[in-house]
């Protein structure tokens, strides 16, 4: 049982690090995108997860598209929390735009079992 938890923890760390730092390799000559994630929201809880993708049903028409996208996502999260209650008991955010959070702390968050 303990071995399963250890393996799950290592797997979550590796998957999260890959999501944050590995760019798709398709069309590298056309797009040359090797960007790390600028914003990550990780949540933990016992309730059914919800999708925040509806934040982008309306296009982001800001001068600063990245900041506008972050605000749209966080605004949708706040509205859903108001309507349905908090879906997650714990969350961690990495936001490179405002220098909040760190990859190390994110990896610790996703791999730690909450009490």
Image (cartoon, rainbow, N blue to C red):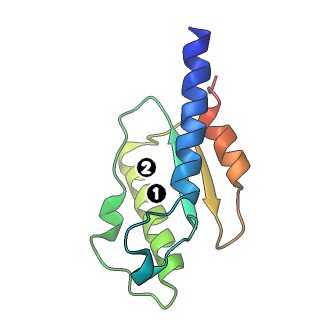
Residue 65, position in %: x, y? 47, 82
Q: x and y percent of residue 34 in the render?
A: 54, 71
Instruction: Name the residue: 61% across, 11% down.
Output: 2
| Quadrant of res 14 | top right
Q: Are marks 2 and 1 in contact (CB under 8 Å)?
A: yes
Query: Where does residue 113 sit, x and y in percent of width and height?
Result: 62, 26
- Which residue, as the protein is rendered here, is positioned at the far left? 57
User: Which of 3/89 is in front?
Assistant: 3
The tag on residue 78 is: 1
Image position of 20 (left or right of 79): right
Task: Name the one closer to the observer, 37 or 14.
Answer: 14
Q: Nearer the viewer, residue 58 or 108?
A: 108
Position of the C terminus by quadrant:
top right
User: Which quadrant, please, contains the N terminus?
Assistant: top right
- Residue 90 visible in the picture: no
Mark 2 and mark 1: span between their CA atoms? 5 Å
- Please give the count of numbered marks on the rendered protein: 2
Q: Which residue is mark 2?
A: 81
Q: Is residue 27 left or right of residue 3?
A: left
The structure residue drawn at horizontal position 42% and vertical position 42%, both measured from the top left corner, is: 85
Q: Secondary structure at mark 2?
A: helix
């Amino acid at each position: 049982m303990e071995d399963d938890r250890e393996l799950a923890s290592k797997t979550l760390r590796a998957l999260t690090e890959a999501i944050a730092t590995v760019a798709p390799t398709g069309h590298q000559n056309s797009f040359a995108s090797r960007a790390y994630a600028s914003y990550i929201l990780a949540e933990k809880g016992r309730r059914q997860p919800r999708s925040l993708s509806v934040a982008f049903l309306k296009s982001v028409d800001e001068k600063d598209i990245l900041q506008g996208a972050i605000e749209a996502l966080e605004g949708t999260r706040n509205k859903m929390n108001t309507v349905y209650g908090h879906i997650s008991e714990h969350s961690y955010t990495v936001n490179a735009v405002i220098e909040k959070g760190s990859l190390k702390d994110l990896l610790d968050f996703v791999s730690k079992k909450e009490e």
